[in-house]
Amino acid sequence: MIFLTRRERFNAAHRLFRADWSDEKNMDVFGKCSNPNWHGHNYVLYVTVKGELNPEFGFVINLKILSKIINKRIIEKLDHKNLNTEVDFLKGKIMSTENLAIGIWEQLMPEIQRYGCQLHCVKIQETENNFVEYFG
Ligand code: NI
């Protein structure tokens, strides 16, 4: 079993809040990420796949294919967007990094399986100090 990770980056806006709470309560629980006028992050996404080495090619998955899947399924939908309002597969979720990672996992898993390997981890770095890892 061998693991391969591809890094991609995107910039996006979000707001952490619950519509059924007041701005005060949202600010109390979610802090600055609850600013009603949105704010942005420079997200870094790490997608790790695992599988057996394909002896014919010497890799787990062709990185060109992996990059294309991530860009088509994720980056094109998220980059320079408002994650709360503009992304079909994130609608209705509290836009935490955790929910973002789960949403990205659900988009990528079936695509990656088609190429004979498994999705191992979706890691998202939201800031220098915060990151989330989802293993399914
Ligand atoms: Ni934030």
Image: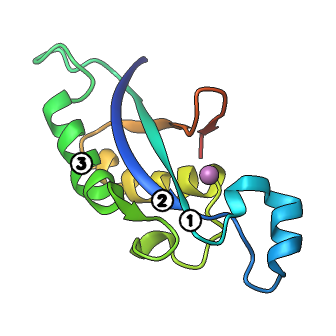
Label 3 – label 2 distance at C-alpha? 18 Å
For the residue pair 43 and 89, the one nearer the viewer reads as: 43
Callouts 1 and 2 close, C-beta under 8 Å:
yes
Q: Residue furthest front?
A: 37
User: Where is residue 39, by image quadrant?
Assistant: bottom right
Q: Secondary structure at mark 3?
A: helix
User: Can you say which quadrant of the picture contains the N terminus?
Assistant: top left
Q: Position of residue 42 (x, y in %)?
A: 44, 41
Question: Quick one: label 3, few (<14), some, or many (20+) residues within 10 Å?
Answer: some
Residue at 10% x, 17% y: name it. 56
* Circle 1 or circle 3, nearest the eye: 1
Q: Residue furthest bottom?
A: 20
Residue at 73% x, 54% y: name it. 32
- Which label sits on residue 38? 1
In the displayed structure, 27 sits above or below 115; it is below
Q: Position of residue 101 (x, y in %)?
A: 55, 49
Callouts 1 and 3 close, C-beta under 8 Å:
no
User: Where is residue 64, by image quadrant?
Assistant: top left
Name the residue tied to disc 3: 71
Q: Secondary structure at mark 1?
A: loop
In the displayed structure, 66 sits above or below 22; it is above
Label 1 – label 3 distance at C-alpha? 24 Å
For the residue pair 88 and 15, the one nearer the viewer reads as: 15
The image's colouring method is: rainbow
* Circle 3 or circle 2, nearest the eye: 2
Name the residue tied to disc 2: 13
| Amino acid type assigned to the residue bearing label 3 in the image | Asn
Residue 62 in sight here: no
Residue at 17% x, 14% y: name it. 55
For the residue pair 4 and 57, the one nearer the viewer reads as: 4
